[in-house]
Amino acid sequence: MRSGNLDTPADLLVLSVDLVPCKLDWLWCGIQTKENAEPPYPSGLRSPAKVAIRAWWDARIQQGRYLAAAGRLFHIDSARDFTGRRAELAITATEFIGEQGEYRPDGAPPRACRVFLNPEAVYRDEAGQATGYRMRAEVALIETGRVQVDEHLVVGGVEYLVTDYDNDTDDGVVRGLWVERVQ
């Protein structure tokens, strides 16, 4: 097997239609970041460097599902049968990066999540014209569900109020939010 050491236990997750993470099973995998000479600077929750993961063949490992391993969270971009004999999978995944934070939904217990903050994101009005710069946050739906306006995020001990959605960013995986620091 080309997988080498499958030495990392991982949870295989799927996001339900109710936006609740469901653990399908756990598996052993080998995780290896694809090295670039100079990986681009991150501009969002998704890391610009792809990750190569190897695992034993399993029909449940599919594009669009998630792997959580060693404190890291991955979205599976593709999973292909490496040998053609249902023995090994070559998985390409996107890792979610960001600061450790907490999502505080109204009427529900707080949830740990990753938050990527961009303090100087261009804000556009309804006509698409840039009107200024605002604080923008990105969160993964697998960790938070769909965050609502007037709910709170806490990052690095600082509390932020969600003031609006970044309408062009909710793609079913990541949601962009406009936030303001709570004084």
Image: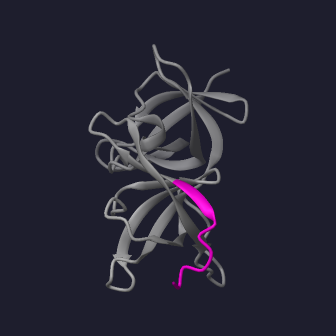
- Between 116 and 124, the one nearer to me in the picture: 116
Question: Quadrant location of residue 34?
Answer: bottom right
The vertical placement of 144 against 109, above or below, is: below
Q: Residue at x 35, y 46 (%)?
A: 170
Q: Residue at x 66, y 85 (%)?
A: 37
Residue 14 spot, x, y in % from top left:
37, 48
- Between 179 and 122, the one nearer to me in the picture: 179
Query: Is residue 45 in sight in this rendering?
Result: no
Q: Is 6 included in the stretch rendered in magenta? A: yes
Query: Is residue 142 in sight in this rendering?
Result: yes
Q: Is 7 included in the stretch rendered in magenta? A: yes
Residue 180 spot, x, y in % from top left:
57, 30
Name the magenta segment's main secondary structure. Answer: loop
Residue 167 spot, x, y in % from top left:
33, 43
Question: Quadrant location of residue 175?
Answer: top left
Question: Quadrant location of residue 148?
Answer: top left
Residue 125 spot, x, y in % from top left:
36, 42
The magenta stretch is 1-10
Q: Residue at x 45, y 72 (%)?
A: 92
Q: Residue at x 54, y 66 (%)?
A: 29
Residue furthest toward the right?
A: 157
Q: Is residue 144 left or right of residue 157?
A: left
The vertical placement of 37 against 8, above or below, is: below
The vertical placement of 3 against 25, above or below, is: below
Q: Which quadrant does the C terminus fall into?
A: top right
